[in-house]
Amino acid sequence: MLVLFTNAGGQLQNDNTKFMSEKKYFDPEDLKKFGNITEFQEEMGKKFFDWYGEVFKEGALTKREKALIALAVAHTVQCPYCIDAYSTECLKTGSDEEQMMEAVHVAAAIRSGASLVFGVQMMNHVKKISM
Amino acid sequence: MGVKQNTKSLSVRGGQMADTFYQLKVLTGREMAEAKVTPFAEKLVQQNEFPLKPHSLEVFQLNIGKLCNQTCLHCHVDAGPDKKRENMSRADLETCLRIIKEVPDIKMVDITGGAPEMHPDFRWFVQECRKLGKEVLNRCNLTIIMANEKYRDLPEFFRDNQVHLVSSLPFYSKKRTDKQRGDGVFDDSIAALKLLNEVGYGQEGSGLVLDLVYNPVGAFLPAGQEVLEPQFKSQLKRKYDIVFNNLFAITNLPINRFLEYLIESDNYKDYMETLLEAYNPSTVTGIMCRSMISVSWDGYMYDCDFNQMLELKIDSPGCTHINDFDVDKLLSREIIVNQHCYGCTAGAGSSCGGEVV
Ligand code: SF4
Ligand code: SF4
């Protein structure tokens, strides 16, 4: 398995460090370069950023609510960039630590529930083939 | 009730950060060059606004003393209970009154500190300004009202003198407020807000204005006032039945204790880059230094409160102290800018009255 995280000091957190000594994924500095994705495909990149900007504007949901949803989704997709970005955004838009942690619990609950609910399928199958 | 101090003032603790010259070195130093934070002046050059000039003198701001009942971690004034020496003299207050009287353009007297109410001449000075027909804005930290029995009648005093109040409440929850301002601050602030509401402050139709100031509890910028104000209003109403007029979202500037916090928490470079990224050219027209001067406890004049704290005295030859006040000289001065100014131009801008665009 490849190494996915570096800690704050940039050190790799995995036994595979011997293969990866100098390389690292998810460098926080890379987030600042996100806008550069237009370099390889300008039209689509631009459309994405326009749409993204539109999505996070105040609408039927407030900016604060959208930031909390984004934070929860960021945990579901386990994207370190998004977790950093939306932790800041949640604070900026006026959420506090407790609210943010509750959002993460919501994400985790849906995620684990989604696994657990397949237990019904398992049970169905077990019952079908059992005497 | 009562407030527990989080820290002591930089000047009492001593060390490099107590020296404003050192702070300026940090603001313009190697790390900033490496982070490619463009000199602020260059930004102004790019939009033909350099040198930055004032366009009026509407606000006369006085920092009447650094004595405060709190020692907030982010305080750019470096105020606290240990700052007993810095108090404006009666003679200087009288000079200020004369200036306020003689300059009709001055519409508002903006009193700040420390906790200005702790100054022995505070009430007298407010009353004199009101007699001159000027709007008086007082930056009240709220907890002072609860700090001692002798301050408990401040709400009535403010009401009787129609003082416009601007008060800090960094968040509508205890945990985050106390983290920044000291244990017990939130509870005392709520108690004080209730007293202010009782005498009419923040109530519709009363004409008594109570504005709250939100400033981030950490190394991030505030979202827009339009995002935060409805939340503050609904939360304070729902949880405590408290009302207020406007919420001002203010950016923390990298000066004094906030600069110390940024450095110690390893957020300094990122914070400065964030300020730079958020630079909004359209804020420059309305930044507060273009319509104010700020007077320090010892009578010297500055372009703004922040320049005052960095001891960047006004660039107005022969007119740097209130004793030599000359409105024409002041209006033709060049405003001194430095890297901390990025705090005033980020996003929707920031000033003592909140956003500027
Ligand atoms: S921020 Fe205001 S209340 Fe806090 S220590 Fe400074 S002057 Fe006092
Ligand atoms: S800190 Fe802000 S108000 Fe002060 S001189 Fe700079 S831009 Fe003007």
Image (spheres, coloured by chain):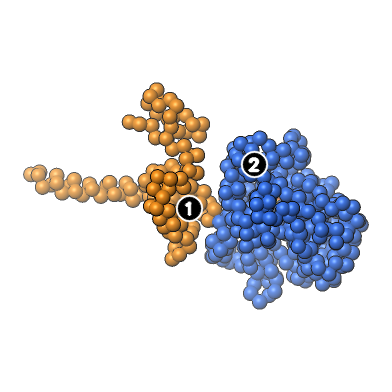
Chain colours: A orange, B blue
Q: Which residue is mark 1?
A: A99
Q: Residue at x 61, y 67 (%)?
A: B243
Confirm whether residue B344 shows in the render: no
Q: Give the quarter of the figure containing the C terminus of chain A.
A: top left
Mark 2 lies on a secondary structure that is helix
Above or below: residue A8 compared with residue A92: above
Q: Residue at x 60, y 48 (%)?
A: B276
The label nearer to you, 1 versus 2, is 2
Q: Position of residue B13 (x, y in %)?
A: 74, 37
Q: Which residue is mark 2?
A: B261
Mark 1 lies on a secondary structure that is helix
Alpha carbon distance from label 1 to label 2 = 25 Å
Furthest residue to the top? A18
Q: Are marks 1 and 2 on the same chain?
A: no
Q: Give the quarter of the figure containing the N terminus of chain A.
A: top left
Q: Position of residue B258 (x, y in %)?
A: 66, 45
Q: Determine crowd level at label 1: few under 14, some 14-19, many 20+ residues with C-alpha closer than 10 A.
A: few
B196 or A85: nearer the viewer: A85
